[in-house]
Structures are given as C-alpha cells and as structure tokens.
Image (tube, helix red, strand yellow):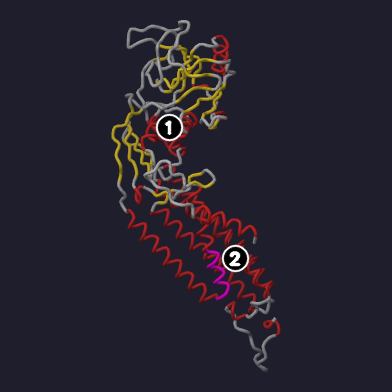
Amino acid sequence: MLLIVLVTIVAAWINLVPRANPTDPNDRRELWLGRDVHTRFGLDLRGGTQVLLRAVEAGVTPEQLDIARRTIEQRVNGLGVAEATVQTSGNNRIIVELPDVADPDQALQTIRSTGKLEFVDPADQQIGDGQLVRTSGSPDITVTPPAALTGTDGITNTDAVSASPTVTETAATGPILQVIADGIELDLNSVQPGVDQTGQPFVAFSFTGDSARTLEQFTAANVGKPMAIVLDNRVESVATIQSALPGSGQISTNTAADRDAILNVLKYGSLPVSFEVETSRSVGATLGQDSINSSFLAGLIGLVAVGLFMIIYYRLPGLVAVLALLIYALITFAIYRFIPVTLTLAGIAGFILSIGLAVDANVLIFARLKEELRRGRPLAVAVEQGFEHAWPSIRDSSVATAITSVILYWFGSNFGVSIIKGFALTLALGIIISLFTAIVITRTFLRLLVRSGRFTNLWLYAVEPVRAPATGVTSPLMEA
C-alpha cells in the first residue's frame, strides 16, 4: 500500500506541474526535478518543423544515405524529440519532420552537422571563433551554422594567436592547418555532458590511438601557445594551452543548449556525407486542438462507460477496478511526460486500447472470484484463488499483445513509419502498467477490504447466497 501511495503521489506531481509560458524562454515551471515534463504532441496535433536535406556531394550511394538517415534519427532522439519522422527521398535527400520543437534552428544545426571534430595548430594565422578554415583532414570547406563554444579544460580563450608555423600553403582559398587530433579516434563512450564549478556547461571527451598521443605531445610542448578546436571546418574555439592534455579534456559552452547540440553531434557519430537545407518550413497541425479535445472527450466517455459497467456488473470489486484504472491513467500520463512520449492520434488510440486491456485483466480476476465464492470458499480464500487462477490467462494475453507491439515498433523503425511506432509504444507501456494496476493495486485494495471485516456481504461481490433445495437454509460456507 505504501508503494501504491508513493507511486500515485509521484505520478500526480509530474502531471500537475504548472504549464510553462511558451513565449517566455525563462519560464522553468514545467520542470520536475530538473527534467522537462511538458506534454508533447505530434505534427498531426500540434504542428512542428519539416526540413528537406539534400546531399552536397554527388554520387551518394544508397548505403551512405541510409547511414545518414539513421544517424540523423539518433541525433533527433538525443534532442528529446520523439515521434520524429526521418526518411529518405530519392537518391540524395532526407526528409525530417520535428513535432512540437521549441528551437527549430538549434535542431537544424544539430541534425545537418557532419560532426567532424579536429584539434588543429593555427600556426601564424589570425583566426577566430566561427571562422571557416581548411585543415589537413578536411581541405574542402563545408558551411554549417556556428555554435558558441568558449574553451577546453586546461585552456583559456584568446583573440589573437601566434605560434610556430606548421601550415601548408595552397593556391586555392588559403592555408591548410595541420591536424593534431582527429575526431575519428574520439572515444564515443567518453563524450558526456557536465557542469563545472562555475556553472558553465561542458562536454567531456577523450581520444584514443595516435590522436591521444599527438594531442598530449603537442600540448606538452606548446604550453602558453594557441590551439584551435574545429567542428565541420568551423573554428569553435581558439584557446591558449595552459597544461598538457593527456588525450582528453572538456569543450565548454555558453549555454546548456549549445552543449547538448555538440554532445549529440559527437556522440552519435559523423555523417558520411554533408547536407544542406533545401527547404525548411513550419507545419500547421492537420488535426489540431479540436481533435485533442474530441479525443479527450471520447476517452472520458469510454472510461465512464467502462466504469459504470464494472460497478453495475461486479459491484464492489468493480468500484475497486475503477479506482485502479484512475491510478493507471495517472501513472501512464506521467510516464508519457517523463520519457517523453510524443502523442499523436495513433498514440492516443494505443493508450485507449491499453485501457481495454487493463479492464480485461480485472474482468478475468473478478469472474474467477465469483466462481470461487459460488463454490462456497471463504471470502479471503476466494480473493487469493481468483488472482492465482486468473494470472496465467492475464500473463499469456499480455505477452501476446506485447509481442505484437514489438513487431509493430520494429516495422515502424525499419520502414520509416513513425506513426506506427507511437501506437506500438503507447500500447506496450499500457500493457506493463496495466499488469501493475491489476496484480498489485487491485489485489492490495481487495485484501484491505477483506481484512477490514466490514464488507463480507456476498451481494457486494455480485454473488447471491446459495440456498439448500430442501430446507431453504443458507449455506454456512456462503454466510462465512
């Protein structure tokens, strides 16, 4: 009972977090223990951003395009954007749909970045943050939007730089800066977010192989001299080396949003080809608030109808089931907001179907309970027997539905049909939570009723006392 009360309080706490003002970026009310728990809706209900990316290079292979699609999908998920649609179009384009995105520009910067990180020696070149440069590892410049970074651990920013020349001159557009450490040897497991003692966000990193060795050698030999951090041919920071870096360090950023963008680009790998934004547009909701209201009303009517049926047919156990279903709905929506799960109309349909599954478990339990009472079992024994005998049927039906959900989710993941993924995810979560509410919550409530000793009348359990045919005397077992 303590577990049920605790879970219910936490779920109610998450669901009742005040709605933040969408026009005020400093309004942080919709945070639960530092996590954003606002309700997210899909493109069909809330609208969002649709982007068409086109490969810059010619001759992109289908394998490269598919790798790029999966990488972009991982980055989008890393931004907390669920129910996003990422699919290929033709032989060199990718369509990205981002529902209910607070900062479309930040998301665009993250998904289109190739993610190539390089530490280079600026030599005698006067370069600054945001400047496009050519490097020995990336001589062809790829233009991507800048991200505001401020330095690395053991390094401080500087505006003017000068050092020993290690630059190879070219006759094209400028010098090629020598690479010290290449992002190909970046240890992805080491890429982690953090906040330093001054409250400044940073991304920790670590190199392996030759890059770790050359980075340590260069920083040890050039303390007090500059080193540039380059991401996709754009200088993110020109900093002064304060101490030797043993193959690892930190990239500090001005804001948490910039940190998260760099984190996702580095952690989820480099794109095999570069992309440019061919078109970007805001998408209005195709169904909108009216459909949200209609769905809410339909769900409420269905819940009330099911509740009335359970109470009329099963009486006291039906009332207990209704209470358990209310807690089920509270927990489910709290999990949707915490994960988060972006709700589309298909996802809402999966949730409503899961309510039916939750009711089905209670129906099996209560039907078995009535059978045990008709056989003359004492009430306490009948309750336990009802759960024990109904459990195999509940388990098997839940496993069968869960297998279907997994198949649907796999199908949606591999064929770019994200709307099916939403339905499968909400249905699978509903199955798990319904098992908890039926086996734990309903059972606990019934045990409390039995142990109270006040609800022993069999009429309350939709069972009429059995009378002996000859004498008309009520069976003692049934009276008990």
**Quick one: label 1, few (<14), some, or many (20+) residues within 10 Å?**
some
For the N terminus, the image quarter is: bottom right
Residue that carries the numbered disc 1 in the rendered image: 67
Q: Quote the CA–CA distance across marks 2 and 1.
A: 47 Å
**Horizontal relation, residue 339 to residue 56: left or right:** right
> Is residue 428 visible from the viewing direction of this image?
no
Q: Quadrant of residue 211?
A: top right
The residue sitting at 38% across, 38% down in the picture is: 103
> Element type at marker 1?
helix
Identify whether 454 is placed above or below 348: below
Identify whether 422 is placed above or below 109: below
The residue sitting at 67% across, 94% down in the picture is: 471
- Which is nearer the eye, 321 or 270? 321
Identify whether 355 is placed above or below 31: below
Residue that carries the numbered disc 2 in the rendered image: 442
Magenta stretch, main secondary structure, is: helix
Name the spot of residue 408 as percent of width and height, x first: 45, 50
Q: Quadrant of residue 77?
A: top left
State the extent of the magenta-drawn residues as a range. Answer: 315-325
Identify whether 263 is placed above or below 339: above
